[in-house]
Image (cartoon, rainbow, N blue to C red):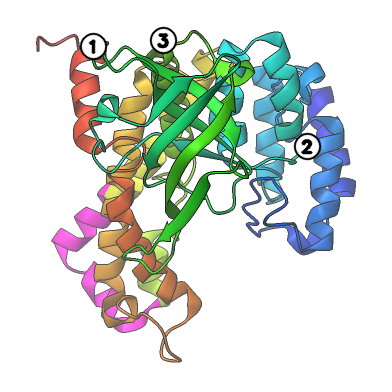
Amino acid sequence: MSAFRDEIKGWLQKACPETIRGRNFDFAGGHKVPIENADFQSWFDACAERGYTVPTWPVEYGGSGLSAADARILREEMGRIKAPTPLAGMGTAMIGPTLLEHGTPAQKQEHLPKIARGEIRWCQGYSEPGAGSDLAALQTKAVDQGDHYLINGSKIWTSGADQADWIFCLVRTDSKAPKHEGISFVLFSMDSPGVSVEPIQLINGSSPFCQCFFVDVKAEKSNLIGQENRGWTIAKRLLQHERSSISSGGGGIGAGAALPDLALRYGNTAQAKLTDPQTRAEVTSIEIDNRAFGLTLRRAAEENHSGGTQTFATSMFKYYSSELYRRRMESSMSLMGTQATGWEGDGFSNEELAVTRGWLFGKAMTIAGGSSEVQLNIIAKRVLSLPD
């Protein structure tokens, strides 16, 4: 391991330009939102060439074939020099791992290398206007046309749909089957005739979510993942990948400045609040919980020797992550006072405005990937084996 670590250190020093270290580019692939920074493009190209955009994927699908232990070393060394993540998004975190488990050899060869090379950006067609948390009540229909389906319906809260090239979509292929059956998992291009997208403005002022409309959209049967009418099992597995991604990414661990640092940065008012025993206890609890959660995630990853996503434990991590993020943002708002209530204008720094919008976005985090109530139900049934 030491030899591999030394190799990675040397490679990173050459491959990752100083100008992009410590910055977040959030590149999710595709050509609709191209890379504009030349140094980040150089860094991305270097990672893609070595398979480090998806380091644990097999080499034949664009990965590097690293073991879980070596991939952890790579992440640690990238973190040490604050190298930006070369490739993020649903391709690497959700549909890619799902295809590795459930795709045919032809489907893997068709889609995975394009994900690894950043050629395609993906979005998720799950929730519908009439079926939010009750996902299995979806009504978007796919009618069998021989070698393809014709899809009609709509999806909502589709993150990044206006920037995505392809969608992985749940459709109903048998309307007479029980609710959790008769569902199929299909892929199709967002540039297909009959697809239209409308962004949805959120309370925090951004528009990562969209509503998608499908009118006689053609989806080839070669892009049916798994068996027809048996897509619910695949859908649930992908949700585990999604929840794992949320909990290990922007949820709790590492989200925002440490609360004591905020108190020091915002002068007498915030420092005075820290002299209050209740506030000190709250800040201390959040900081301890944040560090403990990070160590728990690391231990879970180390115990999972295959390097894959855990099963129903992801619901515990997702629930705790989103609730911890909410607590952190509430405490940040309290410490910063009126400087955390800005929306725009010269009276607020970019960091202060980010706290305001982050606090608002924290409300969405308790819903995205399955609401906190849904996660508690899964934990009760699948982890604790409590009776219905």
Residue, disc 1? 178
Residue 89 percent location from the top left of the image:
58, 42
Residue 176 percent location from the top left of the image:
26, 13
Q: What is the three-letter code of the residue carrying label 1?
A: Pro
> Relative to 379, does residue 217 appear above or below in the rendering?
below
Out of 175 and 109, give the one closest to the viewer. Answer: 175
Residue 124 percent location from the top left of the image:
48, 37
**Magenta stretch in the rendered image:** 266-285
Res 67 quadrant in image: top right
Closer to the N terminus: mark 3 or mark 1?
A: 1
Quadrant containing the C terminus in the rendered view? top left
x 53%, y 30%: residue: 94
User: Is residue 30 left or right of 164 when viewed as pictured?
Assistant: right
Residue, disc 2? 117
CA–CA distance in space, label 1 to label 2: 40 Å
Question: Magenta stretch: residue 239 in it?
Answer: no
Question: Magenta stretch: residue 277 in it?
Answer: yes
Q: Nearer the viewer, mark 2 or mark 3?
A: 3
Question: What SS does tag 2 mark?
Answer: loop
Residue, disc 3? 230
User: Is residue 282 left or right of 219 when viewed as pictured?
Assistant: left
Closer to the N terminus: mark 2 or mark 3?
A: 2
